[in-house]
Amino acid sequence: MTRTTQSAQPPARDRRFVGPAESFRAYCQLIRLPNLFTAAADVLAGFFLSHPRITPESLSFLWPLVFAGVTFYAAGVVLNDWVDREIDARERPQRPIPSGTISASVAFWLGWGFLLLGLALSGFVAWRAGTVRPAIAALGLAVAILTYNFLVKRTFLGPAAMGACRGVNFVLGTSLSPWNQAWLPLPVGMAVYVAGITAFARTEADEPHRGWLAAGLATMIAGLAVVTGYAVSAERFVVDLWRWYALLGILAGWMLLRGIWVLAAPSPARVQRVVTQAVMGIIVLDAAVVFTAHGPLGALPVLALILPATWAGRWIAST
């Protein structure tokens, strides 16, 4: 892959004047505001899964970890738009960088700033908790983000790298506790699910390609199947197993129906709608994980993240 350089800026529109309201909306679009809630849900799910008993002390470690996961996600999407700025100038000229609302240089340094902030927050938690695990997970997440954006984004490995970012973000939430092998199907399944979303969305800006759509849909369903397999290795469930299978079955059935709807008549609008729904499905998936460890009352705060994510999605695109 030929990497573009920072000096290759979009034309003079890069420096046009914008008002405060337009500028604020552009930054919200750049960081994919609705999707930030899904990153928070990943960390929350990992944390509550690995903490059967919640104490005030453990909660004091949770919030810096949640903000770290959110800033890592923001770093990834901002750097993604910086890398894609020339392609977006042709295919999505309304996006913040090619439209000139946010300069390429500002986006570049903002992305790196978010990345460093995520590392700093994770390092702070590691120092306070007296364990290096949060710092190691954060470093792994930073490497995955940079690998995706600067090395494999436009290759066949791109979806896998994007999925790895999501899986490691979940691991970040569990990093205050010793790792339990029984949890492995959860980050792996989520990584596969997100790899499927990435493949499904790969040609959304052009004429959608049925091959990518079918492969992405199959990968999403496979990811949900892996997550469902957590029931085999789990050491404890506070709810009946059939409820777990029903929740995951409903989510898989819904995504399958929506994917078939797109395959029947592919269009950018249909692909983008289903991708948005699949991304919001991550919150449902995370809430289902918390449901197994803390029951419905524990899962409800995570599931409630759907509300601000949906509200933000009414005026900021998720893709």
Image (cartoon, rainbow, N blue to C red):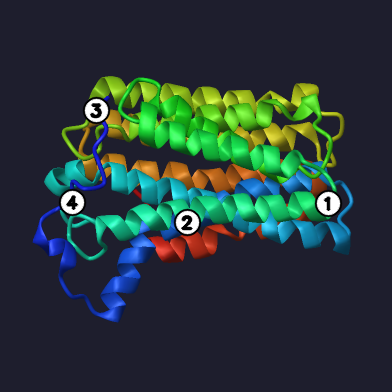
Report which residue position mark 1 lands on: 129
The 10 Å Cα crowd at callout 2, few under 14, some 14 to 19, many 20 or more, is some
Quadrant into which the N terminus falls: top left
Report which residue position mark 2 lands on: 113
Dots 4, 3 in contact, CB < 8 A:
no
Report which residue position mark 4 lands on: 9
Mark 3 residue type: Thr
Most foreground residue, 299 or 244 = 299
Dots 3, 1 in contact, CB < 8 A:
no
C-alpha distance separating marks 1 and 2: 24 Å
SS at badge 3: loop
The 10 Å Cα crowd at callout 4, few under 14, some 14 to 19, many 20 or more, is some
Report which residue position mark 3 lands on: 2
Residue at (75, 53) in percent of width and height: 125
Residue at (54, 40) in percent of width and height: 142
Mark 1 residue type: Ala
